[in-house]
Amino acid sequence: MPKITCLAGGVGAARFLQGLVRVVPPGEVTVIVNTGDDIKLHGLHISPDVDIVTYTLAGIVDEGKGWGIRDDSFRCLAALGRLGGETWFNLGDADLATHISRTRMIKEGLRLSEVAARHSRALGVETVIIPMTDDPFATQILTNDGYVHFEEYFVKRGAASTVRGVRFLGAEEAKPAPGVTEAIESANGIVICPSNPIVSVGTILSIPGIREALRRTNARVAAVSPIIGGSPVKGPADRIMAGLGLEVSSLSVARLYGDFIDSFVMDDVDADLAEKVRSLGVSATVTNTIMRTLEDKVHLANETLRSIGLV
Amino acid sequence: MPKITCLAGGVGAARFLQGLVRVVPPGEVTVIVNTGDDIKLHGLHISPDVDIVTYTLAGIVDEGKGWGIRDDSFRCLAALGRLGGETWFNLGDADLATHISRTRMIKEGLRLSEVAARHSRALGVETVIIPMTDDPFATQILTNDGYVHFEEYFVKRGAASTVRGVRFLGAEEAKPAPGVTEAIESANGIVICPSNPIVSVGTILSIPGIREALRRTNARVAAVSPIIGGSPVKGPADRIMAGLGLEVSSLSVARLYGDFIDSFVMDDVDADLAEKVRSLGVSATVTNTIMRTLEDKVHLANETLRSIGLV
């Protein structure tokens, strides 16, 4: 059985992974997850992408929203609001247990990666989920009002502010979490999930040692484009890429990854860009990348693994 | 309008206070609340008695149980359980907001008494609620398995263990919270609510300076017996008093407070003990002390204030 290591952000990655773990055994998959969105609210450590991936692979995610726990309620958040707390970041009652538990474990001395391992084990997830780093790391968006935390830009402001820049606080000092580099070095194949190339995958790549490990590994590396016909399926990738002066296209994503990928998987609607992707020295697979059904997800996982010779 | 200062534990005190704030304006009442039951669970600072009093005076308490918030749900606790957390201490979803908020404020440097003031203000409570101390304080019960936290004895073990002793960790070093001594000194009347005389009122009295202030104050001091016909209305006062070799009776409670009370209010069923109470040099009021309806509570508050000449 091939061992697959994935780089992942939130919703798009989690949907891709739902298909992947039906193509290869879940226990053979390792997912390195972005923590740039991590935020402290109400004194609790919230890891949005780690939780989205964990909940999705545990089968408890709210499929409609893509985040949070299915059928959750929001009584605690409403009560926090009555006590003067901020309520712009939705936190369900069952979901809060994850943040309370994480905060407590960190206070007791556990690392973020140990917490993620305990939580995924408790929820019956066989796939190995590793936060990209145990060190402080914060993605900030430069708006006309200065730098704001990614979640403040994305959730509180509804991604409505003009993006003038992005910075990754803590990136230079951050070390890959235990197991991250090893998972890249020892995998039979690597998949960059269809996630925001700047604030989800770019964060992971910014940690010293990870990009180098991707260039060095013997495993073939595939990336799935999160951009379809000039816009992302979900999230603010278009505004962030445009704000950084990047063309919002599959080709642009392929270029961002050009130094370490062997294969690029892009949507049918972008077929006309395939030649340009190939000119980067990367194989191009053109297929349906819109994941509405489980069948879509399995298809995309299969095509992606096929592109690096693993199925 | 008379200014009344009360010493309070949990449910019994809160019910008494519901009546009191209908007899005197809520803003003229100050309540000094036991924190000996405070406990850290899931990394959150829980102040059971402060919350019971606050929720009751805010009109949001679950009247049936006497604690927690009306119509609350328990999704977060269930989810904490799935993640391996302890679930023996019931924490509702809306209730958790109080503990999350308190924990955060304490971490940010606020004192317990400042948190209580902010919470009661946010919930529209006009009565001044002051935790007895801002310092660490823990009531422990000596069982046949050694000392356990009061809530572990009371809730986790269902008060089923034999009580061999009680200790108040931190009592010697604890200082009354800001405003406590002043509220005793400046009141027109003081009421010891119908609470456990050992683990609710005894804790407050154990803090250096408080008992002395009660002896010294010019205000007349009334106590309402929590014991009716040899047993408490609620809680483990009988087992704890018996475990300490005390007779479980109104008279016994009057004796515990004999050095600082002027008046003792006891139930009709204990009428035969009134003479013995009076022989302690304390006036005795015999009336109905069972608080089923709001009318009962108002009646008891009126009788209590009348006993110290305030209505």
Image (cartoon, coloured by chain):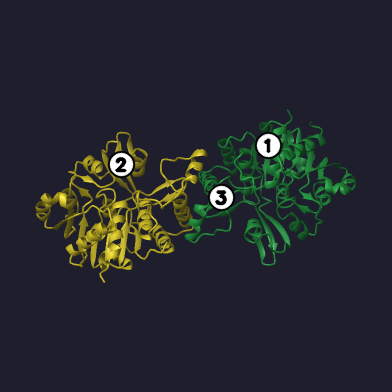
Chain colours: A green, B yellow
Left or right: B159, with B114 as reference point: left
How many discs appear? 3
Q: Alpha-carbon neighbours of circle 3 within 10 Å: few (<14), some, or many (≥20)? A: some
Q: Quadrant of residue B3?
A: bottom left
Left or right: A262, with A19 as reference point: right
Q: CA distance from mark 2 to mark 1?
A: 48 Å
Q: Is residue A52 above or below residue B102?
A: above
- Name the residue at the top extreme: A1
* Residue A118, image x, y percentages: 56, 38
Q: Which residue is mark 2?
A: B141
Amino acid residing under circle 1: Thr
Q: CA distance from mark 3 to mark 1?
A: 23 Å
Q: Which residue is mark 3?
A: A45
Mark linked to residue A30: 1
Subunit that carries the residue with mark 3: A
Q: Secondary structure at mark 3?
A: strand
Amino acid residing under circle 3: His
Taking depth in this image into account, of A191 and B65 the one nearest to the observer is B65
